[in-house]
Structure formats: structure tokens, C-alpha cells
Amino acid sequence: MKTRLTKGFSFIISTTGKVLRAQPGRKAGAAVVVKSKPLIYLIASLFGVLQVIAAELPEDEIQMNMNGYFDNFGVKIVYPDLSVRKSISATTSINGRYLIDIITAASTRSQFNNVYSYQNVESGIDAFTSATRKDTALGHGGGDDFPDETRHEVAFGITQLIGETTVSINNIFSTENDYDSKTIAASVSIPFAKKNTIVNAGIVKSWDRSFPQTRAWTAGKDVLSLSLGMSQIFSVKFLAQAEVFYSNMSGFLPDPYQVVTVANFDSNSLAYFEPRYPDDRKRYAAGMRGIYKTGEPSSLQLGYRYYGDSWDINSHTLSGLFQYSFYEDDLILGLGIRYYTQAAASFFKENYTAEEEYMAVDPKLKEMYSSEFQLNATINGGIIPLINNEDIKLSTRVHFFHRYTDAPDWHSRNTDLRAFIFSLGFRYLY
């Protein structure tokens, strides 16, 4: 299918499919560390733009990335990763990946004593917990001097060609001191109309366990996600995509390190509670994206995505990316922008004066808007004198992110989140 595209258009495909792969899954929550990265990675890799190249195995490659995230809420994340892909026959390719997260988050170091724990009550133990409590009988949990996290993630998968159809299965195993996750995913890509139309379908299932350091309990979460998409090449200058997504989450859904403060003005007292959410959440989204070759060396990508869920959150995302290539695609520069706006969850309140059935302080459940600016560059090693190898590609990506919420963050008390995100990549084709 690559032969149907001019060289100037093929770089559009090769440089847009990995945009989400290196994004930190915790970005949206900032000081709240969200344990959803494996799902984000799989959705991005299974249903990205690269899937338009169907009935072809991915290239044999070694990819190394150094990624980072820093914000004004006290979150610092450094996460290098290494991935390898190898064809073992004309129709079969295998891949493996290792990633390590090194995370510092001010919210996880905070000390809140006498927090009322709903999970404790359900487990039949003392309803009130202390941030300094240590319970080693369960083999985990309890407070210690190192609440910040180091997460290890191992992934492996296989891609199989069956005639014109591409089938992929991937597994991810992730563990850290207070959370672990197991994920399996499968996808299928089927070409039609002389490979000008590609239909993608996939399923992702994950099983997570949370055992926070400042609590004595263990809680589970299951996530099932389905995705269906279609890519269509209309001409050598225009490519369009559409996708629908559905996900069902069940189990323990809050961030256990967050604390809801209830201010009783009658008694002039404060009480602290764990967040309490509904036990399930159904999410759905639909989006479309168009990529147009504006000139021999340039392209413009525009996209829109709608999201809604059973908690009454709905959001709209607009995105744009302009890319320009030099030296016959040996150097590609990109400039992108993304704007996001959402409504608050039905049960979210800025302040609580009494205990309620559901209580939340997570900034991701507030009414908000955000903007993001992206700069990226990809360089072929063949034009670098010291390297002089066309099988090597170097890449860099920088994002500047800003989010505003009407209600201040529960921990930092800021309404504005500002973050800097970077990625440096090395790719070797062999």
C-alpha cells in the first residue's frame, strides 16, 4: 500500500501514528497519579495511523526513548523505554518492550491522619487509617519513607499476516510498590478496495490491583475496551480516518491517595474521607481525522473527538498538526496544537459540608479546558556526518501543556496546571 503514496505523503503516515505512544498516562491528572498507562499505550498502538499500512509486517527495529514530564503541581516523571521488533518469517513478527517510570508526586507524600476509609469498612477493619500506619502482615501497604514510585512494565506481542488480514495480540505486565496491572489486547486490520480502505477492530482487557502505601486494603479494577475504526485513502493527497470507542470500568475507581475534606461549619470541625465513586463507569467516544498533503514537502492534519460517559462527563477535542519535510523526507519538522474542554462529573462538588454518597476531588472530574502545543523533529541518520547511516533515525518531541479548572486543585490549591513534556528517540532498522 505504500506504493500508492508519493514519498511526500508517506511521511505523514510514518510520523503521526506514534504521537500518543510516549505520552505519560498521568498527565491528565497531574498531581494525581493515574494507573492507566498500559491501556493508553495499547489503544494508541493498535488503532493509530500506522494501521493504514495493512497486509505488511512492521519493520524490524530497535527503538529507545527517553521521556519526561514535569509540572507545577509537584509531579516529576522520567520514563525511558526500550522496544524490539523482529520478523521470524514472511508472515510473522514478534515484539518486546520494557519501560521504567521514576515518579515524584507531592500528593503521595502528604500526611493525612484519621482518614475515614470506605474500603476499610468493606474489609471489616478499622474505619479510620493513618498516613503513617504500616501493616506488613499483608505483604504490602502501609506508610514508609519512600512513597514515590518506580514502575516496571514489560510487554510482548505477535503480529500475524493471514492473507490480506493483519492480526495482532499483545500483553502488558506492570508493577510498582502500590499497584499492578495485567493487560491483554487483540486487533485485526482488514483491507478493502485495493487496500485503499482499511477497517480496524480491537479489544483490550485489563485487570488491575491497588494497594496504596497509606492504606491496609487491596482493591481491584477491571477494564474492557472495544474500538472500531476505518481509514480511507481518497487520493495521493488526502487520507481520512474515523473511529468509535467504548469502555467499561468496574471496581475501585478513585485515586486512593486523594483526600476529601468535609468542613462542618456548625461544629467548626474538619473531617477527612477517601474519595467515593460509583463502582462502574461506561465511556464512549467518536472521532475523525483528516490528513492533507498541502504541498510536495508538507502536510496538514486536523482532528476532532467527542467523549461521554455514565458520570455525565462530556468533552470535545480539536487538534491540528502541520509538518514540513526537507531533503526528501530525511528531516521532518512538525508544529501542533490541541484544545480540550469538558463538563464536570454529576457528583463532583468544589466543597463538601457533609458526608455524601459520592465525593470527589480529582481534577479530571472537574469542568475544565486545556491547550497543548507540540514541536517535533525526525532526522534520518544518513544526513548526519558522524552517523551516516540511513537505518538510524533520531527524533525529538516537546509539548507545552496548560489546563485550567474553575475549582482549585485539592492538593496544590492551584487552578492552573502547567506542564512540560519531552521525548528523545533513537530508532535502528536492521
Image (spheres, helix red, strand yellow):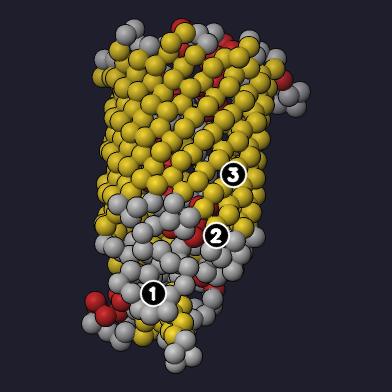
Q: Position of residue 204 (x, y in %)?
A: 30, 42
> Which residue does the image show at 35% across and 52% down from the upper left?
312
Q: In the picture, residue 413 is in which quadrant?
A: bottom right
Q: Judge the density around disc 1: few (<14), some (14-19), many (≥20) Cα neighbours within 10 Å.
A: many
Residue that numbered label 2 is attached to: 406
Identity of the amino acid at label 1? Glu
Q: Residue furthest right?
A: 385
- Spatial CA distance of label 2 from label 1 is 22 Å
Amino acid under disc 2: Asp
Number of residue marks: 3
Q: Residues within 10 Å of mark 3 (few under 14, many from 20)?
A: some
Question: Residue 379: x percent and y percent?
Answer: 66, 26
Tag 1 residue: 274
Q: Which residue bears the numbered disc 3?
A: 371
Of marks 2 and 3, the one in the foreground: 2
> Is residue 135 positioned above or below 401 on the image?
below
Q: Position of residue 197 (x, y in %)?
A: 35, 15
Q: Say whether disc 2 or disc 3 marks the residue closer to the N-terminus.
A: 3
Are discs 2 and 1 less than 8 Å apart at CB? no
Q: Is residue 207 above or below residue 391?
A: below
Numbered disc 1: secondary structure: loop
Q: Secondary structure at mark 3?
A: strand
State the SS at label 2: loop
Residue 366 can be seen in this image? yes
Q: Give the Cα distance between marks 1 and 3.
A: 30 Å
Examine the rendered structure and indicate whether residue 314 appears above or below residue 355.
Answer: above
Mark 2 or 1: the one toward you: 2
For discs 1 and 3, the disc positioned in front in the rendered view: 3
For badge 3, the amino acid type reads Ser
Query: Residue 71 — which label?
Result: none
The residue sitting at 33% across, 55% down in the picture is 311
Residue at 63% of width from left, 24% of height from top?
323
